[in-house]
Amino acid sequence: MSYETLEIDNAGGVARIWLNRPDVRNAMNATLIAELAAAIDAANADESIRVIMLGGRGKGFCAGADLKWMGGARDMSAEENRADTGNLAAVMRRLYDGPKPSVARIHGACFAGGMGLATACDIAIASADARFCLSEVRIGLIPAMISPYVIKAIGEHNARRYMLSAEVFDAAEAFRIGLVSDLAPTEELDARVEAMLGHLLNASPQAIDATKQLIRSVSGRRIDDALTHETAERIARARTTEDAAEGIASFFEKRKPRWAQ
């Protein structure tokens, strides 16, 4: 499939998906959102792809929604508006719930919907020059679709500050509040991202998928008999998988498992 707003590089088990509208700082419009959904679906369906990386070409990761595109919402019916906004919500859900781990490579501007994409990914790595902003309230909007992912990442208290103030903050603050997993000097960003991709490629694909499901299920729950039983059931199932058999065998045979790079 050819893409108008994305650049795709599939190599070495990684689908590198680049937002490619550098003239507007990779602002999202209907075409980009539809193509991003298709690219993520293709990566998840491709058995040769083990990890998804999401980055932005040009001077920034993603400046949020394209306001020219957003301006057309006033001429849409309520049903058309719901369908349009639902497309971006579905993209973030694909990243968050997908079976394959995702890494956001963040530099420059990461604003509004761009923060939604970053926090929907499993891991976000930012360069020291990155800048962040939940800018919606400045233009009379709300950060609705991205809120579940942003709040999970930074917590309600920090969300209240940055969603209400719409102030710009730097990469160090993003790291402090948990928005990004790691910081890198600008010139070392790619090396840091590649190192993380290597870690993920050394993990069992079955175990990665099951662990993503485990985190979603366990997060925020009270530790009680039901949760104890559920986690015991999950590890019992994991112990019988082909990947578990291969991983344990490779340990005793002092070799890499078949999935390791």
Image (spheres, grey):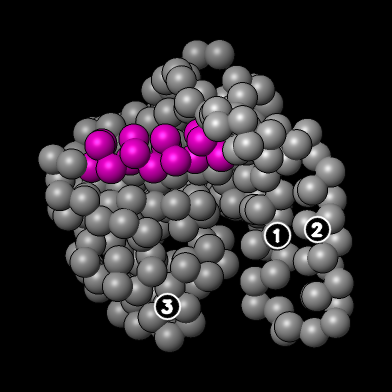
Instruction: Give the total of numbered labels.
Output: 3
- Of tags 1 and 2, the one toward the viewer is 2
> Could you tell me if residue 139 is visible in this image?
no
Element class at badge 1: helix
Callout 3: 10 Å neighbours few (<14), some, many (20+)? some
Residue closer to the observer: 207 or 99: 207
Majority SS type along the magenta span: helix
| 202 shown above or below 122 | above
Q: Nearer the viewer, mark 1 or mark 3?
A: 1
| Corner quadrant of residue 66 | top left
Q: Mark 2 or mark 1, which is nearer the start of the sequence?
A: 1
Residue 23 horizontal/vertical position (percent):
23, 33
Mark 2 neighbour density, 10 Å: few (under 14) some (14–19) many (20 or more): some
Q: Position of residue 220 (x, y in %)?
A: 65, 77
Q: Which residue is mark 3?
A: 159
Choose between 135 and 259: the one closer to the eye: 259
Report x, y in % for residue 123.
44, 52
User: Mark number for residue 214?
Assistant: 1
**CB contact under 8 Å: marks 1 and 3:** no
Q: Dot 1 surroundings within 10 Å: few (below 14), some, or many (20 or more)?
A: some
Residue 111 seen: yes
**What amino acid type is highlighted by mark number 1?**
Leu
Q: Residue at (63%, 45%) from the top-left corner?
A: 208
Residue type of the residue flagged with mark 2: Arg
At 80% from the left edge and 58% from the top edge, which residue is drawn?
Answer: 234
Please state the extent of the stretch shown in magenta in the rendering.
189-203
Label 2 to label 3, Cα distance in Å? 33 Å
Give the Cα distance between marks 1 and 2.
Answer: 8 Å
Give the number of the disc on residue 234. 2
Q: Is residue 223 magenta?
A: no
